Image (tube, rainbow, N blue to C red):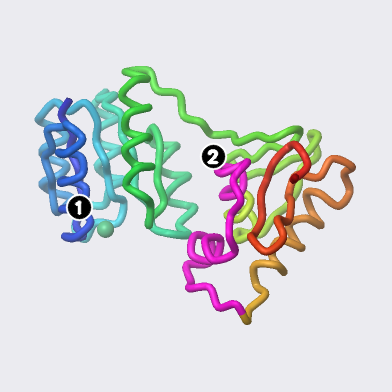
Amino acid sequence: MKLLIVEDEKKIGEYLRQGMTEAGFIVNLSRNGMDGNHLAMTEKFDLIILDIMLPDLDGLHILKSLREAGNKVPVLILTAHGSVEDRVTGLELGADDYLVKPFAFSELLARVRTLLRRGASPVVETTLRISDLELDLQKHRVSRGGQRIHLTTKEFSLLELLLRRRGEVLPRSLIASLVWDMNFDSDTNVIDVAIRRLRAKIDDNYDHKLIHTIRGMGYMMDSTPAP
Ligand code: CA
C-alpha cells in the first residue's frame, strides 16, 4: 500500500513517515504543496494524508484539483485546531476523513486503515449520534429529539469530543488540551463552566441525561447512567 503524505512541518512529517513505514506502508513525503500536488496528480497512491496549512499551495487546492481531475483516491486531511471552516470546506471538496491537530498517531493509523478497507467508494461519517442527540459535522448542526440546538463554536467542539469518545471518562486536563488548546490549571473552572452551559442546552430539559460527571475524574458522555 502506497501513501502520500503532504506535510510542511518537518517534525510531524518525519514522525508520520516513520510511523507509517513501520506500519508497513510505502511512504512518499512531500514538504510543500507544489511537490505534493505534482505527485498526487501524476502518481498512483492508495491514500493521501494532506495537511491543509501549507506555505505555497494549500491542501484544499490540492484536494480540489484531484477531485476535478476525477481522481477518487481516499484523502484524509489534517486541519489546525479550531479551523472549522477548513474542515467543512475539505469535506465538501471530497475529503474522506479529517483529523484535527494535535492527534495521536494510533488514531491516524486506525483512520487510514478504515479508509483503505472502505475502498474506492468512501462514505464520510458526517453525523455523530447518541440516543436522540445528533451532531452533524458537515452542516455544523446539533439537534436533540429533532429539535435544533444552537451551540457556540467551543460548545460544539466540546460536544464533538465527548461524542467521539463516548463511554470514556475524559479528565478535565484532556478536555482542556483538546478543546481549549491549553494546559490545565486546576485553579480554573473553565471546563466545568463550559460543561454546565452545554448541559443547559442539551441535557437539562430532558429526562434522559447524556453527560455524566465522574467524581474526581472528569466527564463522560454515555446513553446509560454513570456507575
Ligand atoms: Ca502545515
- Type of the residue with mark 2: Gln
Question: Depth-wise, is mark 2 or mark 1 nearer the camera?
Answer: 1
Residue 204: x and y in percent read: 86, 52
Residue at disc 2, CB closer than 8 Å to ligand 1: no
Residue 81: % across, % down? 43, 59
> Which numbered marker is on residue 15?
1
The residue shown at (36%, 35%) is: 110
Amino acid on which the number 1 mark rests in the picture? Tyr
Mark 1 packing: few (<14 Cα in 10 Å), some, or many (20+)?
A: few
Q: Is mark 1 within 8 Å of ligand 1?
A: no
User: Which residue was labeled with disc 2?
Assistant: 138
Q: Is residue 120 magenta?
A: no
Examine the rendered structure and indicate whether residue 46 appears above or below residue 35.
above
Front-lying residue, 182 or 144? 182
Q: Which residues are magenta?
A: 160-186
Q: What residue lies at 67% left-to-right and 46% top-to-bottom?
A: 221
Residue 136, x across and y down, in percent? 61, 38
Kind of element beneath mark 1: helix
Q: Quadrant of residue 147?
A: top right
Quadrant containing ligand 1 reads: bottom left
Residue at x 30% of width, y 29% of height: 74
Counting the numbered discs, the total is: 2
Question: Which of pointers 2 and 1 lies earlier in the amino acid sequence?
Answer: 1
Q: Secondary structure at mark 2?
A: loop
Q: Quadrant of the C terminus?
A: top right
